[in-house]
Amino acid sequence: MADKYFQALGRRKTAVAQARITTGGKGTITVNGKAFEDFFTTATLRYMVLRPLAEVGKTETVDVSVKTSGGGMIGQADATRLAIARALLKLDIALRPALKAKHMLTRDPRKKERKKPGKHGARRSPQWRKR
């Protein structure tokens, strides 16, 4: 077991993911104590999470452990992707141009808009009656 690890945080909407990359691994990925394939069940979510590792060619050389909470599955997958990309950056700063070119170091700032007083939601107004 290698003792050197790099940790980073990723967020998306209300989802938060903490990724820990361990050098000298075999390419195993665990999310919340489960196997990666058991946690992210669809191929799209798996592809989204594996993209930073695949772009820099580290899929088989590092082990990844992720703790994620909040939000839904897509938000957690996107937060995990950002956390892994940031941890890879701590591992090797030379990977920055490759990750930045694929927009993997940019946090998605969109969040749910708050409800306003006098409205049903963020923008939905009560039904208007003329008479």
Image (cartoon, helix red, strand yellow):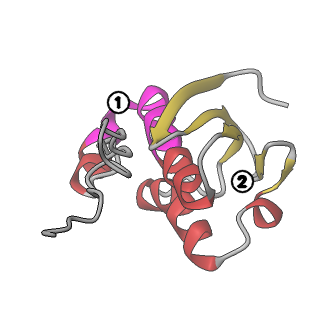
What residue is pinned by disc 1? 93
Q: Nearer the viewer, residue 101 or 82?
A: 82
User: Quadrant of residue 72 in the image?
Assistant: bottom right
Q: Amino acid at mark 2?
A: Gly
**4 relative to 123 in the view: left or right:** right
Which secondary structure is most common in the magenta stretch?
Answer: helix
Q: Is residue 66 left or right of residue 126?
A: right
Check residue 1 for magenta coloring. no
* Amino acid at circle 1: Ile
Q: Nearer the viewer, residue 71 or 130?
A: 130
Q: How far is disc 1 from disc 2 in space, using C-alphas?
A: 20 Å
The disc at residue 52 is none
Residue visible at 72% across and 53% down? Answer: 27
Q: Camera-side residue: 17 or 52?
A: 17
Which label's residue is closer to the chain start, 1 or 2?
Answer: 2
Quadrant in which the C terminus appears: bottom left
Residue at the far front: name it.
131
> Along the horizontal axis of the image, is 131 left or right of 35?
left
Tell me residue 75's x, y (percent).
52, 53
Residues shaded magenta = 82-96
